[in-house]
Amino acid sequence: MTEPSLDRRRRALKATALGIRFVLELCIACDVGNACAGTDLGASAVRPSVLRKRRRCMAVWGAFLSPKRKYEIGASGRLILEAGFFAGSALILICLGWPALAIVLVITATTDRLALALIP
């Protein structure tokens, strides 16, 4: 393969991995809301107190983990915080009675993290 073709494939893979990453971030936000609402589905998931907790969770994510983060905590700090978010989200899913979904979330998050680390 030619070099431009490889570069195009790398960019496509990176874009796909970043898209998956965004969906995983939304999963965390939904899980936090579900845990705060005490339900897995329903109208209580949009109560103002639940929405505030979701917003706080995503503010922490944005301040420390997003590409446009305000605060730099180092690669190992980001990895630990990110692992904590995903582990917490998996625990929430387990408590809500969805252990298979928790396993899928952890496997997907780990695979996506490795893909983002390995794709130049």
Image (cartoon, rainbow, N blue to C red):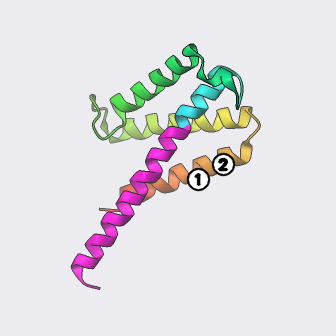
- List the residue tagged with mark 2: 103
Residue 59 lies in what quarter of the image?
A: top left
Residue 87 lies in what quarter of the image?
A: top right
In the rendering, which numbered label is found on residue 107? Answer: 1
Marks 1 and 2, how far apart in space? 6 Å
Task: Tell me if residue 24 is in the magenta stretch.
Answer: yes
In the image, 105: left or right of 20? right
Count of marks placed on residues: 2
Give the crowd class for mark 1: few <14, some 14-19, many >=20 residues within 10 Å: few
Residue located at (30% from left, 41% from top): 67
Magenta: main secondary structure: helix
Q: Front-most of 54 and 3?
A: 54
Give the crowd class for mark 2: few <14, some 14-19, many >=20 residues within 10 Å: some
- Per the image, label 2 sits on a secondary structure element best described as helix
- Residue at the extreme front of the image, as rendered: 43
Quadrant showing the C terminus: bottom left
The answer, for residue 56, to whether it is visible in the render is yes
The residue under label 2 is which amino acid type?
Ile
In the image, 105: left or right of 114? right
Residue 116 x %, y %:
38, 55
